Amino acid sequence: MPVVSYKVTLSQDERNELHEISHSGTRAARVVLTALVLLAVDRGEFQTTKPSERDIAATLHISPCSINNIKKRFVEEGLDAALERKKMPSRGKKYDGDFEAHLTALACSQAPDGHARWSLRLLSDRVVELQYVDKISHETIRQILKKTSLNPGKRKNG
């Protein structure tokens, strides 16, 4: 599969904005690094020698692949998209209130034979066994029970 080489040509306004970002010291390091990469790979300035992408990568301590990704985002989506981090889609709630109610009731019930109290791993195994869910980790059980201020391992005397 051939590697696509993206050519970055900055306008004077974009160049000025990137210079301001890289010299102001008030932006995140990742944004400053992206600005430096874009300034280094710019083909719009008339210079007799341009550093290679490998030289730029070595100087900035990043991989050549990262440089190509920055160039790709700039060419396809513009300057703002190249500077800003991609928005990650939010994951919906995996477990509803009905499941949480079943889990809470189970955690408040009598522990299985041979155990003094419920453990998180026992609870996770039991909700799968009862087919409330297909699979669930003990850490997820802990987080759900923490929301309800229910701690099956903690005893209160008095």
Image (tube, rainbow, N blue to C red):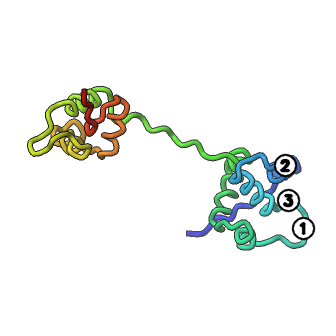
Q: Could you tell which of marks 3 and 2 lies nearer the N-terminus?
A: 2
Q: Where is residue 93 in the image (x, y as percent from the top left)?
A: 39, 34
Q: Position of residue 135 (x, y in %)?
A: 26, 45
Q: Which residue is drawn at 63% across and 47% down?
A: 85
In space, the residues marked 1 and 3 are separated at their CA atoms by 9 Å
What's the mark number on residue 158?
A: none
Residue at mark 2: 20
> For numbered disc 1, what is the local secondary structure?
loop
Depth check: 39 or 127 in front?
Answer: 127
Residue at mark 1: 47
Mark 3 or 2, closer to the camera: 2
Q: Which residue is drawn at 72% across and 70% down?
A: 53
Q: At label 2, which amino acid type do we have?
A: Glu
Q: Which residue is drawn at 37% across and 31% down?
A: 147
Depth check: 110 or 126 in front?
Answer: 110
Depth check: 27 or 69 in front?
Answer: 27
Asked whether, in this view, residue 106 is left or right of residue 76, the answer is left
Q: At label 1, which amino acid type do we have?
A: Gln
As drawn, 148 above or below 50: above
Residue at mark 3: 44
Are the two marked residues, 1 and 3, in contact with CB atoms closer than 8 angstroms?
A: no
Q: In which quarter of the image is residue 46?
A: bottom right
Q: At label 3, which amino acid type do we have?
A: Gly
> For numbered disc 2, what is the local secondary structure?
helix
